[in-house]
Image (cartoon, rainbow, N blue to C red):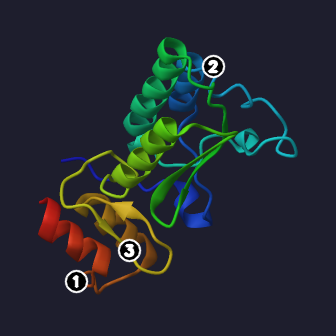
Amino acid sequence: MTKPVMYSYRTIGIYSMDKKLQDKLYKKYPKIFKDRNRSIRESCMGWGIDTGNGWYKILDILCSLLQWDTDENKYPQVVASQVKEKYGGLRFYTNGENDTQHGMIKFACALSELTCEECGSMTDVTQTSGWIVTLCPEHMKAYNTQRGIKDTKKTDKHSKYVKQNFN
């Protein structure tokens, strides 16, 4: 078993998906991420995709569905204005979307709260209290070790609810 790596952005509080993964999304969905090269004064997409790598698949599927509906059903073109982690969940802000697109985005955001931000695992995922992160047991242990947290038995109400209803 390999030792989990907690990237330096966790220590300084700045999230950023690996550039290779971001570029894959940008290349696959250029219309959704058309503002990616704008300055941060013009669009928050100038910051890039501010999530861990574990949510790459969620974002890939979401963008695929959004673009398909735009192309096939003549829905409005969704343009991402900001993609980030907040309170342990995905936030996908756009220039506007219809009700169907909004539902897709809400579902992806809800799914992220059950998915490890680091690796994408959905097994025994929990959220921390305080600065909220959503991690699998392996990455939670590394997160706690990095911060010198010894009492790892504490879980919040969300984690208990998930374990009771989804595992």
Q: Position of residue 33 (x, y in %)?
A: 65, 28
Residue type pointed to by label 3 = Thr
In the foreground, 107 or 56: 107
Q: Position of residue 112 (x, y in %)?
A: 38, 51
- Mark 2 burial class by Cα count in 10 Å: few <14, some 14-19, many 20+: some
Residue type pointed to by label 2 = Pro
| Left-right relation of 153 to 156 | left
Mark drawn on residue 128? 3
Mark drawn on residue 30? 2
Q: Which structural element holds mark 2? A: loop
Q: Position of residue 64 (x, y in %)?
A: 44, 24
Can you say whether 73 is above or below 9 in the image? Answer: above
In three-dimensional space, the C-alpha distance between marks 2 and 3, rounded to whole angstroms, equals: 34 Å
Q: Quadrant of the C terminus?
A: bottom left
The tag earlier along the polypeptide, 1 or 3, is 3
**Residue 23, located in which quarter of the rendered image?**
top right
The tag earlier along the polypeptide, 2 or 3, is 2
